[in-house]
């Protein structure tokens, strides 16, 4: 075959495949926005569910998800950033750092439902936190740890070596160097990882199934030891477990969840691209 | 002088907590495994591992209960094979296009699109699968229910694609520029260079991408539970409902009695899943390291 013709055909096939990856996002968004927009109202977003979820709003689920995500971040960000600092600034290429890297790869690969089992085993049962916001947040926090460590590592590694050399040569200690000459420059990258972690934690269902999520709980949680409803679990429940829920309520719930998660991811993409453009070294 | 001593103490403390944070990731992996064992091991006092893995029937609440997970393993395998058959060729092709062919602007947009697909929560994808794909498969193949292994495979294919695309794309981009220049200088077209030189050089990284995509599919829970119809029988075709390992845990944990044999059996399934994904990720990581060298 004529190589130019072969190239044309091949490129069209590859383009088609790429569209197959990217178009579903648009289609899913379109379906959910068109069918769900009619459900969105002040009442839907900010009132309690009534009549076994057939009427009323999804406020406890929204608030529950915010609590869970916040808890996960408070736990995972300090731990993850410090782990990244260890890997980039302190460890040499020894067995420990290799072990830590291998552990991070495996944490990223553990199925979400296995995190749920782990949370049930350790936080709910062993530490006796019960099914609670605390158990759910800690479980989600461990799950998003790899996301945060990986982004923070990339951010730290992108800070040029001579920033550190200059600071050390002026007599600053190792920690002072990291604190004042490295971390500030890595901040946007760390922020990106944090937002991505937020998005991931907000959308996950399996880790909270046995650790916190309540099927139907039309009141707000009072403390971290309370159960709570959560958006992703609520969507699962009303789309598979409870018959007779109005269609636009299902789509509306999906729309709220999708908006929350996609906005977080979009924010992360924007922070990252701005950071890349502004970078001067 | 005192302030220096205080500072030194503070820094010593900070540096030790940084070291500790690094070790925590290792600790968590160990803890996950230990707690799965702690809760799941009691099953094997009354049951042999062979009976558990190769037992043909999963009737956890019959009298006496039967905990054979072969139907679940085959369910996971069937759905995963189907998803891989769809997502691997499409994902690799898309990675080649994004890395080698797309102009710069389009490239950034496509990468962002792939990231957004990865970001959609699995419960939303499951929801879309139930309402669009399910009815479509039901009428197209004239089967009694649209919630089948095939529905699961197609749904999961879309969840594996972002992983495959982004890691394969990294591997392709990492191929040294001289390879392309040499091929072009010999008179190869862009496509010949892409297919015969670049794709071949990026093979270990692509293999890792495929493995990580498959790892994601095996571990996926919510979407697969929602669209596969949940029948714990040994599957005979793509057009019947199946039940995967992950879906079984998620669906049945709520009904099991804590500390009972059913509870232990669900944790034992967790052990199986943990080992499978541990192996897949470990091997994929080895390939990625080889690719980087």
Image (cartoon, coloured by chain):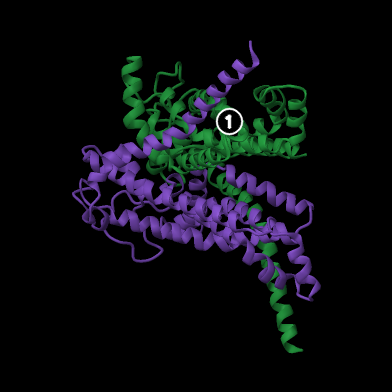
Residue at the farthest bottom position: B1
Q: Nearer the viewer, residue B3 or B251?
A: B3
Label 1, on which residue? B97
Tell me the quarter of the picture where residue A168 sits. bottom right
- For the N terminus of chain B, give its image quadrant: bottom right
Q: Nearer the viewer, residue B220 or B90?
A: B90
Is residue A49 something that shows in the picture? yes
Residue at the farthest top position: A1
Q: Where is residue B127 drawn, in percent x and y?
A: 35, 36
B287 relative to A242 in the view: left or right: right
B78 relative to B199 in the view: left or right: left
Give the colour of chain A: purple
Q: Where is residue B106 drawn, in percent x and y?
A: 53, 38
Q: Where is residue B239 drawn, in percent x and y?
A: 40, 18
Around disc 1, counting alpha carbons within 10 Å, would you say few (fewer than 14), some (14 to 19), or many (20 or more)?
A: many
- For the C terminus of chain B, give its image quadrant: top right
């Amino acid at each position: 075959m004529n190589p130019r013709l072969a190239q044309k055909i091949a490129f069209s096939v590859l383009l088609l495949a790429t569209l197959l990856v990217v178009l579903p996002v648009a289609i899913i968004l379109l379906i959910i926005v068109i069918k769900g927009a009619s459900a969105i109202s002040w009442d839907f977003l900010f009132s309690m569910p009534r009549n076994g979820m057939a009427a009323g709003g999804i406020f406890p689920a929204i608030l529950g998800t915010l609590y869970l995500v916040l808890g996960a971040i408070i736990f995972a960000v300090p731990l993850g950033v410090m782990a990244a600092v260890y890997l980039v600034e302190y460890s040499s290429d020894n067995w420990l750092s290799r072990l830590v890297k291998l552990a991070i790869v495996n944490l990223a690969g553990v199925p979400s439902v296995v995190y749920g089992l782990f949370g049930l085993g350790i936080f709910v049962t062993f530490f006796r936190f019960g099914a609670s916001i605390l158990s759910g947040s800690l479980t989600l926090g461990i799950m998003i740890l790899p996301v945060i460590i990986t982004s923070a590592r990339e951010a730290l590694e992108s800070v040029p070596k001579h920033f550190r050399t200059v600071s050390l040569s002026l007599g600053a200690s190792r920690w002072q160097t990291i604190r004042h000459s490295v971390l500030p420059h890595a901040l946007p990258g760390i922020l990106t990882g944090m937002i991505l972690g937020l998005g991931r934690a907000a959308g996950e269902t399996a880790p909270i199934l046995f650790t916190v999520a309540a099927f139907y709980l039309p009141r707000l949680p009072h403390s971290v030891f309370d159960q709570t409803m959560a958006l992703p679990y609520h969507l699962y429940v009303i789309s598979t477990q409870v018959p007779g829920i109005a269609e636009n309520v299902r789509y509306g719930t999906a729309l709220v969840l999708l908006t929350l998660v996609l906005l977080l991811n979009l924010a992360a993409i924007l922070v990252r691209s701005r950071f890349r453009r502004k970078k001067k070294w | 002088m005192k302030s220096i001593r205080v500072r030194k103490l503070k820094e010593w403390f900070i540096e030790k907590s940084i070291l500790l944070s690094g070790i925590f990731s290792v600790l968590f992996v160990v803890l996950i495994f230990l707690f799965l064992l702690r809760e799941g091991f009691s099953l094997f006092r009354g049951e042999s591992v062979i009976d558990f893995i190769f037992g043909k029937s999963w009737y956890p609440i019959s009298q006496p209960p039967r905990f054979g997970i072969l139907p679940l393993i085959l369910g996971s395998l069937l759905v995963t094979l189907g998803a891989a058959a769809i997502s691997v060729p499409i994902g690799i092709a898309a990675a080649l296009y994004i890395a080698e062919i797309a102009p710069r602007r389009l490239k950034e947009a496509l990468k962002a699109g792939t990231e957004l697909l990865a970001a959609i929560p699995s419960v939303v994808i499951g929801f879309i699968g139930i309402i669009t794909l399910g009815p479509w498969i039901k009428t197209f193949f004239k089967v009694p229910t649209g919630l089948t292994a095939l529905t699961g495979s197609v749904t999961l294919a879309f969840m594996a694609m972002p992983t495959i695309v982004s890691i394969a794309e990294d591997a392709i981009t990492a191929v040294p520029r001289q390879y392309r220049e040499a091929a072009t200088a010999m008179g190869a077209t862009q496509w010949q260079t892409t297919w015969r030189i670049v794709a071949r050089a990026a093979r270990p990284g692509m293999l890792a991408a495929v493995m990580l995509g498959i790892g994601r599919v095996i571990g996926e829970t919510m979407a697969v539970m929602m669209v596969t119809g949940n029948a714990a029988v040994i599957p005979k075709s793509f057009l019947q409902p199946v039940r995967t390992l992950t879906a079984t845990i998620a669906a049945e944990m709520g009904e099991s009695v804590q500390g009972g044999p059913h509870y232990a059996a669900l944790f034992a399934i967790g052990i199986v899943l943990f080992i499978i994904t541990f192996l897949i990720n470990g091997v994929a990581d080895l390939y990625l390291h080889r690719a980087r060298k």
